[in-house]
Image (spheres, grey):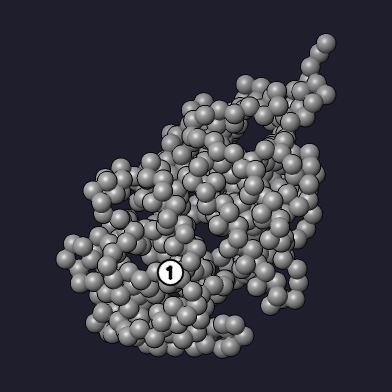
Amino acid sequence: METTQSLSVTFARGARRVTGSNFLVEAKEGGTTTRILIDCGLAQGERFSESVNAEKFSYDPASVDAIFFTHAHADHIGLFPKLVKDGFRGTEYATAPTRALLAQMLEDSLHIAADEARRNHDAPPYSAEDVAHAVSLMRELPYHETVRVGSALSVTLYNAGHIIGSASAAIDAFGTRLLFTGDLGRSPAVIVPDREYPEKVDYLFMESVYGDRVHEPIAESVDMLRSVVEDTRRSGGVLLIPAFSLERTQIILSNLDQMFSKGGKPMPVFLDSPLAAKVTAVYEQYPEFLREDIRARMQKGDDPFSFPTLRVTKNVSESHEADQAPAPKIIIAGSGMSHGGRIMAHEARYLPERSTTILLTGYQAAGSLGRRIQDGAKEVTINGASVSVRAAVKTLGGFSAHADRDDLMSYVEAVKPKKVFVILGETQSSAFIAQRIQGFLGIPTDVPREGETLSL
Ligand SMILES: [Zn+2]
């Protein structure tokens, strides 16, 4: 009997878009079809949860055999409860830290999305029950351990060097190897071990958030953080840091710890983000997923994410204390793009002051409040009220957990695929890196569109 084999990839979401990572791989052999998903993330932009998230999935969730999560950022996991609500009953795989973070991150997403839905008079994409159901079945998959799905597919995770537990997923089927990078880290990375370069990859599906940009060196960001802290001390003002709870906050804390313990005069720091506090506990729980020098600090009894002037606020009344404490002071609060969370109250209070500095530490999605501030708006709307911006606005690029143009080029050069599909970036950024890969490395590229299905 003749068996027919076919392999395809559908870019359900996350093509020509930074967020909403969701890719379907189908392997057909004879009469059997095996389907797996890589990620199921929220599309984000002007809103934390864009209205497109409410749409039906373009495939039948009940027909999917397994899902693999590359890491615990909302744009990679945040739509998973809806997938479960809509019928997914397959197996879920992730690394141990991703699994530990998933419940916390999804609960947080639920709160922000529900608040936002109330403000916009529409329905959130899922409920608390959906989240509880979604996180109950997760299996742990260590790096380098191969798992089979059906008879046709096998999947292996490799360290992506982006955030704790982040993974790239290699899929082997019928002698062909696909590699989905997930989000890739810089090289060298700041807190997690450097990304790996899987071998014998035929088709590479690579992120491109910063495909057309080069980050400043990490050392420059360390210096800039130091000088912004010193300026805040001199001006007696407030340093506001909108926090990305996962990875960026731990990088900032670890740098402040180093700065204050190596002769820098300590300053009061308020970590006003319950989520960031919980996430930091996961970092402390999985030292084997951190860089060797960070692990060494921990073994010597130094908590790299804590110092004597750090105050972690637990509830809203402690959040008010952060407001009332005398300046100079540093307030780190979520969310990172000012989509919601406690940072908004601090912004409403301190952005009108000339002595304030707001320090943006990561990607600000087009249309987000953070992006408007970054683009120099003199007046913004926060919780329905108009707020004038007299604060200094600074951007720290070097602490990005994302590979930049040069990191992406060196990654492709090391992996040597036959073809690169550039995904997870704004169109301009994806097109730029695609052209560069083709021009400099002679490897064919494509920038697929959402909804497109590719037969391999
Ligand atoms: Zn990410």
Q: Position of residue 387 (x, y in %)?
A: 52, 87
Q: Position of residue 204 (x, y in %)?
A: 56, 36
Q: Is mark 1 within 8 Å of ligand 1?
A: no
Comparing 392 with 435, the one in front is 392
The answer to whether residue 51 is seen in the rendering is: yes
Quarter of the figure with residue 93: top right
Residue denoted by label 1: 360
Q: Position of residue 425 (x, y in %)?
A: 57, 54
Image quadrant holding the N terminus, namely: top right
Q: Is residue 352 above or below residue 117?
A: below
**Measuring 18% from the left and 62% from the top, which residue is drawn there?**
262
Image quadrant holding the C terminus, namely: top right
Circle 1 packing at 10 Å, graded few (<14), some (14-19), many (20+), is: many
Comparing 377 with 213, the one in front is 377
Q: Is residue 56 left or right of residue 217?
A: right
**Measuring 45% from the left and 82% from the top, which residue is drawn there?**
320
Q: Is residue 122 left or right of residue 400?
A: right
Q: Is residue 303 above or below residue 376?
A: above
**Measuring 36% from the left and 71% from the top, which residue is drawn there?**
311
